Amino acid sequence: MKYVIGAARIFVGVLFIVSGFIKLNDPMGFSFKLEEYFSPSVLDLEFFTPYALTISIIVVVVEVILGVMLLLGFKTKFTLWSLLAMIVFFTFLTFYSAYFNKVTDCGCFGDAIKLTPWESFTKDVVLLVLIVLLFYGMKYIKPLFSPLVGKVVLGVSLLASAAYAHHVLNHLPVLDFRPYEIGKNLEEGMGIPEGAPKPIFEYEWMFDVNGKEEVYVTNGDYPNVDGEFIGVETTEIQKGYEPPIHDFTIEQEGVDHAEALLREPKLVMVVAYDLRKADRPQFQAIKTVTDDALQNGYKVIGMSASSSEQTKELKAEYNLNFDFYFTDETTLKTIVRSNPGVLVLERGTVVQKVHYNDLDELTW
């Protein structure tokens, strides 16, 4: 039992630290996921939405610290009760998401590891069982260091977590797991490789046969039935390959210009998913760098999910020398965790990506 508890202690502690660190690397992304949970169509807790970023930082820092405390054997009873409370809450969320198909990705491991809702729920159930096991074998969880050393290690961990969160929020995630990271080609990310698995659908055909409703199931073919067709229900029983970048458009007046723009030899994208939430004074600096880019032969475009009235107002206010295009808000949030942010592309390949605090790092 001593070795079983030891193995469970390490597994749970390391998993909480890894999961917490991945989200700590991108707390903005985790806050977007929380906003999904708070939306009216899911938990209907919209009053939490303005505090989503604060909540995300607190949750991920606590997740990391609890993992460290478990490995240290520091305040074991408090640590286990805290871990139990957290995992019970997460288990409820993942079950709710899976059963009602509300949030298709819990964000447990950010963009690094994508889990389906049921995979996330299964992971949380396993952790719940292991934490209950740790309660049973609490006497085997011994501190690794003296209380003083434990407090020092814990304090350093807390300060390091807070400093890291501050850094990525004021710049960009140090580790970028998204398909828009530097070095990735967006056109290639939208492609479907040859031989990729295709989705499989099941069709339930309903017919009136001699006054009785009968159902025939096929994988697509229209059944040869001597009866009157009533209707059909379609179910996707196996997902096909989904490219990392999908539903990506750069529209203007209803026309998608993505294909042409991604083939530009030198392109600058100014991304601002929502101008109402953007740090608007930063557009003065955006004006300077984009004027420099234009002088160096770059094509410059703006990308936003805001209305044309809002983009025209912004353009006039800061005398911006480029036009805005419409792109889906979720896509823009995924492209860069900065509002506004800037990307530099060469024939669809991302060569530079910066937060508005790092505009001086752009080179032409």
Image (cartoon, helix red, strand yellow):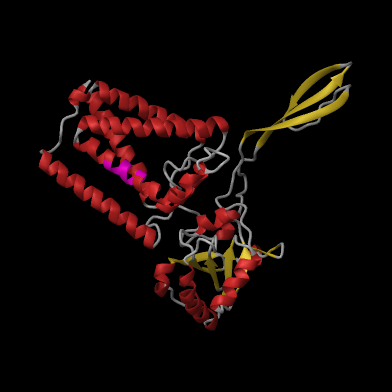
**In x, y percent, where is residue 67?**
28, 39
What residue is rendered at 18% in x and 25% in y? Answer: 140
Q: Indicate left or right for 144 with 212 as reference.
A: left
Foreground residue, 193 or 313? 313
Looking at the image, which residue is at 46% across and 71% down?
281
Image quarter of the N terminus: top left
Residue 262 lies, with reference to residue 54, above or below; the image says: below
- Which residue is the extreme one toward the front? 47
> Which quadrant of the view contains residue 249?
bottom right
Residue in front for this viewpoint, 208 or 99: 99
Q: Position of residue 173 (x, y in %)?
A: 39, 57
Residue 22 image offset from top left, x and y in percent: 37, 47
Which residue shows up at 42% across the image and 55% down it?
A: 176
Judging depth in this view, the residue of 185 and 105 nearest the camera is 105
Furthest-bottom residue in view? 295
Using residue 78 as the reference point, say whether residue 278 is left or right of it: right
Q: Is residue 100 magenta?
A: no
Answer yes or no: is residue 72 visible: yes
Residue 263 in sight in this render: no
Locate residue 230 relative to residue 9 in the image: left or right: right
Question: How many numbered marks does the figure carry?
Answer: 0
Query: From the viewer's perspective, is residue 246 above or below residue 265?
Result: above
Task: Tell me which residue sits at (59%, 43%) in the image.
Answer: 241
Residue 262 to residue 102: above or below = below
Main secondary-structure element of the magenta-colored stretch: helix
Instruction: Please indicate whether residue 86 sits to the left or right of residue 206 in the image.
Output: left
Tell me where residue 123 appears, x and y as whole percent: 42, 32
Residue 62: within the magenta? Answer: yes
What stretch of residues is rendered in magenta?
Answer: 59-65
